[in-house]
Image (spheres, rainbow, N blue to C red):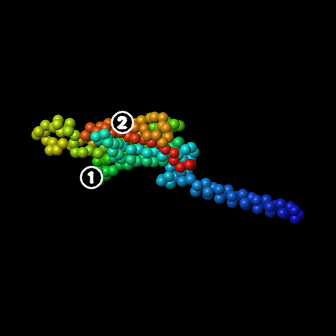
Amino acid sequence: MKHRLFVVASCLFVASLVLSLVSVGAEAASVRSPYSASDGESTLCVSGPVYIIDVHVVVTINNVERTISSASSEVCSVNPANFSDVVVQGPPPQDGAPLEVSKKVGVEGTIRLNGRTAVLETNVYLPTRGGSSGQCANAQPGDGGSTCKSASLGVNLSKTWVFVRNTWRDFYVGPDDNGDPVKVRVRLSDGPVN
């Protein structure tokens, strides 16, 4: 009888020990990687590598490159990621009116990965300098326009390419309102271990 009681007590002890180890392991798993949490701040990465995307908007003026906007984000190999670096110029719109593209400067968009292929969907908002010489040259006196203003410079860019880690890729956007070339530079580098 003592032997049977000892076996039952041993089984109960072992079972309680296993349960406590399983619960501690589950807590450790939830604390170990912030990328498995869905808290609105972290990237939800269930499996696969995590990358860091860097996006720069660069304008070349007199053969000198100047970065006018830069954004970065974590991106999983299975989930799209958003990035944004947009500044609003001038006063905000009143009464919930939509924000004019001409008041934005910067870059925002989404990137998706499919194996080694990256799909970039982005909007680039270029700063205006008060008018381009081409537009002002075409203005006629007395046409009702008191000043010459450039059009809003919001450009949508959609690109797909096979990426190489830690290597910059350049995509031409177009000229700004002074005719200077603008490009988007994108790099995917290794992120934290998931």
Q: In this view of the protein, which residue sits in the foreground, 181 or 119?
A: 181
Task: Look at mark 2 in the image and give the residue it sits on.
Answer: 172
Viewer-side label of 1, 2: 2
**CA gap, disc 1 to disc 2?**
28 Å
The answer to whether 37 is drawn above or below residue 114 in the figure is below
Locate residue 58, reporting x and y percent: 35, 42
Q: Of the numbered discs in the image, which one, if any, rests on residue 76?
A: none
Residue at 32 percent of width and 42 percent of height? 64
- Secondary structure beneath disc 1? loop
From the viewer's perspective, is 11 left or right of 59? right
Which image quarter is the N terminus in? bottom right
Locate residue 50, reporting x and y percent: 53, 46
Q: Looking at numbered disc 2 in the image, what kind of residue is underneath it?
A: Tyr
The answer to whether 94 is drawn above or below residue 65 in the figure is below
Residue at 38 percent of width and 49 percent of height? 85
Residue 34 in sight: yes
Looking at this view, name the residue that lies furthest to the left: 142
Residue at 43 percent of width and 48 percent of height? 72
Locate residue 38, reporting x and y percent: 52, 52
- Secondary structure beneath disc 2? strand
Residue 125 in sight: no
From the viewer's perspective, is 17 left or right of 120? right
Q: In this view of the protein, which residue sits in the foreground, 23 or 124?
A: 124
Looking at this view, name the residue that lies furthest to the front: 63
From the viewer's perspective, is 134 left or right of 27? left
Q: Mark 1 touching mark 2, by CB under 8 A? A: no
Q: In this view of the protein, which residue sits in the foreground, 159 or 143?
A: 159
Task: Look at mark 1 in the image and give the residue it sits on.
Answer: 90
Looking at this view, name the residue that lies furthest to the bottom: 2
- Point out the tag, 1 or 2, that comes first from the N-terminus: 1
